[in-house]
Image: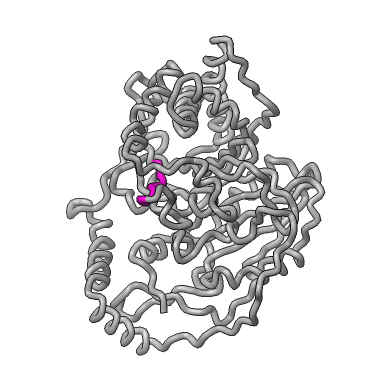
Amino acid sequence: MQRLSPLDAMFLQQDSPTMPRQVASLAILEPGADLDYDRLVHVINERIDLVPRYRQVPRSVPGGLGTPVWVDDEHFDISLHIRRSALPRPGSLDALHELVGRLIARRLDLDRALWELYLIEGLEGDRLALLFKAHQALVDGSHTVDLAQVLLEETQGTRDIPHEDWEPRSAPTPAGLVASTLDHHVRHPADALRVVEHQLSRITRHLPVLGGDTPVPRSVLSTELSRHRRFATLSADLERFRLVREKHGGTVNDVILASIAGGLRGWMLTRAEPVSAKTSFRAMVPMSVASSDGLPTSLGSTVRGHLLSLPVGETNPVVRLHQVSYALKDHRETGSAVAANKLANLPGFATSTFHAVGARVADAETGRGHQIVITNVPGPQDPVYMAGMEVAEVYPCVPLSGHRAISIGVTSYRGRMFFGIVADREAVPDVDVLAQCIEDALAELVDSVRDTGTRAPRGRQRPPRKG
């Protein structure tokens, strides 16, 4: 039996109607995709053997003597995990964002395998969308990767994958769970200590005076989370970020973060929120760390949380970029940073797994008092396919937790940069305005390059829609 780590157990315990602990990703297929529900079920049935945990459920140990264990779901029914939905005509992006916002707010059934996949039909332009949802306790990047990584292929042709008939193993009895847990603690005393530490952290989390989480100052980014979410997207030409980097230095990631900082500034001004020269927000930016050979240590990589002060109060976009670049300089100079092309060239569509791992790291370090989570994962620049159908766009959906009202996930793919913005529905009714303000902040940086005589292509820009 495989046991949940204390962090995974924490995700299960913290799952609530206002804080569903699940990470998601939205993929939009090219027009004319010939994919229906039955074919989708067939494809997943062929590949689910590669991720056996997608047919398992966590079972608690009586008395809380240890963390839960993974056991086979004796009643596993794939039709309960693959859902079908459709947009009302004309199938606008507004309607897609509204639906995604509702679906990512809906909790997974913790008595079943902790994932769902929605086939969304009726999107304008004869397109289909797929929404992947997985619990944060499920995807750790080492034992289990995100389902999208298994389903999305690098070639259009279908692979022959060995498939065996699956029969669930009998679940252990309560007495058997207790006995195996005690035996495990005797053989692994360090694990027993971690269980005790985990139980103590559950108590102190609700007693700040005894050492709970660092209080987060109330701000436009902090709220008591509701049960509902909004979702917005933004797509921009990757070349625009590269041109800004080439002119002003730093990295593409620096340009992304500076654009987000400028976007937050513009968004606050539209809401008549106070903004001064000293206004800043603490962002948790998970970053991959390489092993001694310069590669990520696993498909999920070793990811560390980097706390960054976003210079929202800075009026000059170029100065804002330089401030971000300087703040991240130490990470680049350690020699452990993973180059974007190495992450993008990992086998399969590993992007969604990295976002899931990044969200785990951010939540594990909630005591550092960050106000927003931003994950940025470079993806492949060649097309990927789902059941032979080309994927056009991919947007991450990073979950909200604590008092954080907004999270932002960014993925590069096929020469474009895709932003997925998740927000609390009540606290941020204007999430589409935030998406537009990020686009405007990027345009300011691009204009700073154009002013020097370098032409910066804008390409086809799709305006953000309401979430």
The answer to whether 189 is drawn above or below residue 43 in the figure is below
Residue 317 in picture, x, y percent from top left: 46, 19
Q: Is residue 229 magenta?
A: no
The answer to whether 309 is drawn above or below residue 128 in the figure is above
* Residue situated furthest left in the rendering: 210
Query: Is residue 223 visible in this depiction of the protein?
Result: no
How many badges with numbers are in the image?
Answer: 0
Residue 171 in picture, x, y percent from top left: 47, 85
Q: Is residue 80 left or right of residue 60?
A: right
Residue 223 in picture, x, y percent from top left: 40, 42
Q: Nearer the viewer, residue 215 or 352?
A: 352
Q: Quadrant of residue 190?
A: bottom left
Residue 188 in picture, x, y percent from top left: 26, 76
Q: Residue at x 66, y 53 (%)?
A: 154
Q: Nearer the viewer, residue 103 or 397?
A: 397
Q: Residue at x 48, y 28 (%)?
A: 255
Question: Which residues, given as a range, are shown in magenta?
Answer: 285-292
Q: Is residue 288 magenta?
A: yes
Q: Main secondary structure of the magenta part?
A: strand
